Image (cartoon, rainbow, N blue to C red):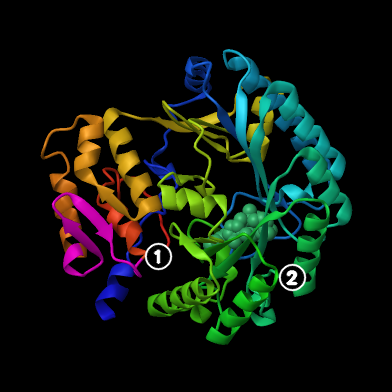
Amino acid sequence: MADLNAIFAARVPRYTSYPTAPHFHSGIRENTYAEWLTELPAATSVSLYLHVPFCDTLCWFCGCHTTVVNNYAPVASYCNLLAKELAMVAKTLDGRRTVTHIHWGGGSPTLLTPDDVGRLSAAIHEWFDVAPHAEFAIEIDPRGFGGDMAWALAAAGVTRASIGVQDCDPKVQKAINRVQSDAETADCVALLRAAGIGKLNLDLIYGLPYQTEDGINRNIDFALSLHPDRLAVFGYAHVPSFKKHQALIPESALPDVAGRLEQESLIHDLLCATGYVPVGLDHYARPDDAMALAAREGTLARNFQGYTTDTAPALIGLGASAIGALPQGYVQNQVAVPIWRAAIEAGNLATARGFALSFDDRVHRHVIERLMCDFAIDLKQVRRQFHLPCRYFDDALMRLQPLAQDGMVRIEEECMTVTPGLRPAVRLASAAFDAYLDGGGARHALSA
Ligand SMILES: C[S@@+](CC[C@H](N)C(=O)[O-])C[C@H]1O[C@@H](n2cnc3c(N)ncnc32)[C@H](O)[C@@H]1O
Ligand code: SF4
């Protein structure tokens, strides 16, 4: 185990994009984004990500782009500007587009009033054709969630909800400033189901301060009692140099790498024993869930929200810090809410940075996305698909040798498979195909 611990102590990206966000640069601004939008072929379906960067209180573990607000005025005006940004993007596109996937994330989008939820959803329908089978997912903080909001979400067309649970132990909750009773979570689930939103995901985190084996058993028991379709089980990403408030987390109470691996493996065993199937690096789903199906069929995808069944060729990001992924490359909006606000108020797109993909980037992006989703890759097949020369992947294969020697991956000819039971090794294997690693000044969390 000592060797594995050392290897998992490596800090490598989670690859929600390739190249990863720290490599985005300010050479890509609103004029490039407008060009890319105009170039999107008419038949291209799109997915929409709307970011709501507001919360009632700050959880000290939080790694998201969010700020605490004490009154509703800034949220209301943000919501109006989101509708304006939607209209600006829609007008830049050459013709009306079909939307196959909508995601409202944050922060806590359920901080909006029920009326604003309706207004924002109406703005989407005003500017886009939402496909009848489109998935509309939203992230929910169950604290303070009420029946009026559940019905407003249902009326807006929400089909799937992702509920933040994190951990149920009061000692852990106090240490992460996220006090939430089991009853609050269970009520939220019941209200959503009563309103007809039946597809539910729960977010849990391991690697938090003071978590014990008993506590983890209890978290899973509680989560299972709610019968979710999916669970996202994240390893706590502790990067206080990047997220200053994480310094409030007592570091001495955090598990070490071996402890994190044990927690991950306990959760894995408990969920698999109950019939959930592991999907990707950190998700579990009922075998009949669309995500489990996508994983089986090799169509699972990865984007900034993590694993997804969304395969639309263009993801349009709206709101402060939102990232879009177009066939030509990535674009990120201004992260600071006041700067994003000023751009949209002035009638400009709010693009702050991005990345234009070269041919090699597209090849590596494909390999890394398939690896992160399938835990295996046939490089010969990739060479055929992209018309690449024989020795194209030689350097990457050389970088994989130490992992193969440690038994983390198996390489036969040009087929590479991550060892079953060592799912976190997929980040290290992906890093072997990352031409930019260590060049972006990024700080990443532990790979396990
Ligand atoms: C935007 S929040 C979900 C909605 C809502 N704000 C909430 O917290 O209930 C996204 C999720 O990311 C996860 N998360 C946030 N910060 C994290 C971190 N530092 N490490 C691992 N997971 C994290 C949490 O599980 C959280 O539920
Ligand atoms: S975890 Fe969710 S509720 Fe907590 S601060 Fe982050 S975004 Fe807000």
View quadrant of ligand 2: bottom right
Between 302 and 212, the residue placed more toward the observer is 302
- Distance CA(mark 1)–CA(mark 2): 27 Å
Badge 2 marks a residue whose secondary structure is loop
Q: Could you classify mark 1 by the number of other residues whose Cα lies within 10 Å: few (under 14), some (14-19), or many (20 or more)?
A: many
Q: Residue 144: which quarter of the image?
A: bottom right
Residue 212 can be seen, yes or no: yes
Residue 51 can be seen, yes or no: no
Tag on residue 180? 2
Q: Are marks 1 and 2 in contact (CB under 8 Å)?
A: no
Q: Please tell me whether residue 225 is drawn above or below residue 201 in the rendered image.
A: below
Q: Residue at point 61% right, 40% down?
A: 336
Instruction: Say what amino acid the circle numbered 1 marks.
Output: Leu
Q: Residue at label 1?
A: 446
Most distant residue in the bottom direction? 214
Callout count: 2
Instruction: Say what amino acid the circle numbered 2 marks.
Output: Gln
Between 295 and 124, the residue placed more toward the observer is 295
